[in-house]
Amino acid sequence: MPTVYILNGPNLNLLGQRQPEIYGSTTLADVEQSCTTLGKELGLEVRFFQSNHEGVIVDTIHEARHKADAIVINPAALTHTSVAILDALNTFDAPVIEVHISNIHKRESFRHHSYVSLRAEGVIAGLGINGYLLALRHLAPLLRGV
Ligand code: DQA
């Protein structure tokens, strides 16, 4: 079964409590559960990660090079700052989908630029946590060849 790594950056562990007017009231554990359930339906193995530390995310991308068939990543604030995450993703030879819960283009100008978008095949922003599920729906036929 194809494996998809879903990576989440800083502060997303507080999803549901953190600025719910922007990010909603669903927790990250709920998102993980929804992704795992949908993954099963779509024939994908989903592995879900969150870290507040840039280096841990880089290490997980390195691990994905050998263990994953695609990456879905919400780098959170590191989207706008991290050349290291971009460089790590550039070592990964399979699809990368960037997800943002909020519409970063409707927010402060410092959120409009994404280093990760230079690598991502596609970007989903502003569709709430549905963005993660839409990314899986996009990847399933590509990875399963159906
Ligand atoms: C975010 C948007 C980022 O600008 C912000 O720093 C986040 C979350 C989103 O999912 O909307 O932490 O990536």
Image: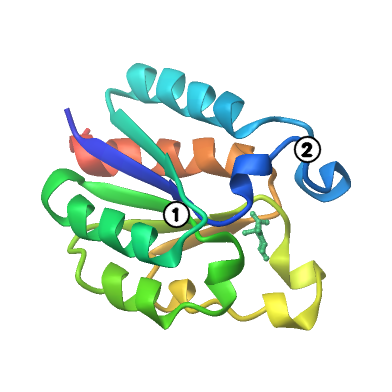
Residue depicted at x 47% and y 28%: 35
Q: Quadrant of the C terminus?
A: top left
Q: Which residue is mark 1?
A: 73
Residue depicted at x 36% and y 77%: 84
Image position of 1 (left or right of 70): left
User: Mark 2: which amino acid?
Assistant: Gln
Dot 1, crowdedness within 10 Å: few (<14), some or many (≥20)?
Answer: many
The quarter of the image that holds ligand 1 is bottom right
User: Mark 1: which amino acid?
Assistant: Ile
Q: Is residue 20 above or below residue 25?
A: below
Q: CA distance from mark 2 to mark 1?
A: 21 Å
User: Tag 1 or tag 2, which sits nearer the N-term?
Assistant: 2
Identify the secondary structure beneath mark 2: loop
- Please identify the quarter of the rendering in which residue 5 is found: top left
Q: Considering depth in this image, is 81 or 136 the residue closer to the camera?
A: 81
The location of residue 131, given as percent across then percent down, is 58, 44
Identify the secondary structure beneath mark 1: strand
